[in-house]
Image: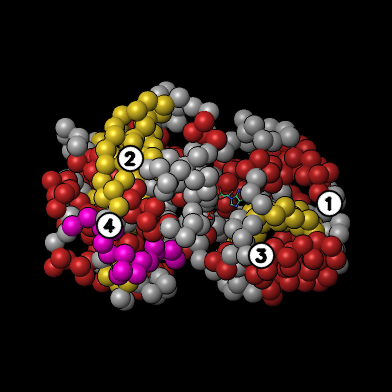
Amino acid sequence: MEIIHISAECYPVAKAGGLGDVVGALPKYQNKLGHVAKVVMPMYRTKFLYNNAWELVHEGSQYIGTKWFHYSVIKEKTNKLGFDLYLVDINGLLDREKIYGYDDDSERFTAFQIAVCDWLSKWQHLPDIIHVHDHHAGLIPFMIKFCYAFRHLSQIPTVLTIHNGQYQGWMDWNKAHYIPAYDSWKWGMLDWKKNINPLASAVRCAWKVNTVSQSYMDELRYAANGLEDLFEYEKGKCSGILNGIDNEVWDPETDEYLAKHFSVETLEKGKRKNKKEICKQFDLDVEKPLFTFIGRLVGEKAADILPEAISSSVYQHQGNCNFLILGSGDPVVEGQLESVKQQLNGYVSTYIGYSESLSHLMYAGADFLLMPSRVEPCGLNQMYALRYGTAPIVRSTGGLKDTVIDIGDPQGFGIRFNEASVWDVTYSVGRAIDLYYNRKEQFQQIREFMMKIDHSWESSAEEYIKLYQSLK
Ligand code: ADP
């Protein structure tokens, strides 16, 4: 089968979160299963672009509204990611350093999608599946169904994967002219509550829709940032497929960012060495349990409760714990974390920013990983933590619920709680501290058990293939 993935992110080319990880891994594993999966994404000006060799495969031009634009498509020459990677360039729109966060994002991603459809419509053959990811590619199922210029693509089955339903790409109807001429009777397929809503449009127009865990799919029918009724109505074509992790990138035996490699057999020594390295860098005490948080400092991740939850934990548990936070986002939370760090120097440290290398070292050296998320479609962090023998402490939501079992259960290996509240986090940290100091043997067994859990992409990649096959 030939599958075209269309996405705004793909690791290691450009990544802001889990979407990048998934699009960087899933196609590779689909290819390993004997299919031909390709990735198409915008050509941002990232390091990966400058450090690799490219060939030009197509040039074309199109209109966005009344504005004419020229686009080109380049392909990475060596297949180094394990799949064909195509970048679409549009000067003035996509040639930026960052992925998102510009005032003209609607125009940028609409133009990207128009260019992709235009390019695909010039192919001599039709691919078997068009697989779009999140709202940045969400207008494509509509475009190929109803835009006159792309109509002959309309027989190609489309699949939408929702990595995060909070962000929907809303556009005012005064931007409707961005979308190439379409059957105007179908305007309702773009609309949700008087806005153009690319995610809602994709849910309606794609042949199949999935989220990245079953629990998140169920939750969307009750909490979907305004799209609850739509998910209820479309539930027949919706399903959940849990993400995998790329075991080749995330391997404590080979990970280039670690101070010491380790396996299940050498986990105690290996983790200790990595923890020492972190504690040295951040002035923390290696003898105390190390709690970490890695992620965007936003409400979805409940980052706003972290400053108080951390100080409450340090006070309530008599300083028998250390915290290290890696992330960036809400400036208020960033500031609060910095002041907690000042107040509780020696117990709390932070790295405000993005650091791929530090994140790997933290998964390896930490004892516990905190994820109090209010919303977590799948969550990759807890799966990386498991692979590196770090116990996740998670709120029971979305993919966290599907991947972590509480230590109260005989099969359990993590800690779960119900509310994104200071009290629940503080209490859970207490349970973890008890495990660390008073039940050392059990903790060691849990770590070994976690490292053996298989969350690799092989089985998820196969589930996607089954989903595609159901459309043939
Ligand atoms: P989301 O996509 O909602 O941000 P996921 O759990 O699906 O959350 O994926 C988060 C990914 O981003 C993980 O690979 C995590 O390690 C990485 N990440 C998030 N913030 C940072 C950061 N500040 N520095 C390094 N890696 C980060």
Mark 3 Cβ and ligand 1 under 8 Å apart: no
Q: Nearer the viewer, residue 238 or 62?
A: 62
Q: CA distance from mark 4 to mark 2?
A: 15 Å
> Which numbered disc flags the more N-terminal residue, 3 or 2?
2
Region rendered in magenta: 166-181
On the image, numbered disc 4 is attached to which residue?
A: 65
Q: Nearer the viewer, residue 279 or 227?
A: 227
Eye-nearest disc, 1 or 3:
3
Eye-nearest disc, 1 or 4:
4
User: Which quadrant would residue 466 be assigned to in this image?
Assistant: top left
Q: Which mark is residue 71?
A: 2
Q: CA distance from mark 1 to mark 4?
A: 56 Å
On the image, numbered disc 3 is attached to which residue?
A: 331
Q: Are marks 1 and 3 in contact (CB under 8 Å)?
A: no
Q: Disc 4 residue type? A: Gly
Q: Disc 3 residue type? A: Pro
Instruction: Find residue 21 and report its horizontal and vertical position in percent.
Output: 49, 45
Secondary element type, mark 1: loop
> Which numbered disc flags the more N-terminal residue, 2 or 1?
2
Q: Which mark is residue 284?
A: 1
Eye-nearest disc, 2 or 1:
2
Secondary element type, mark 4: loop
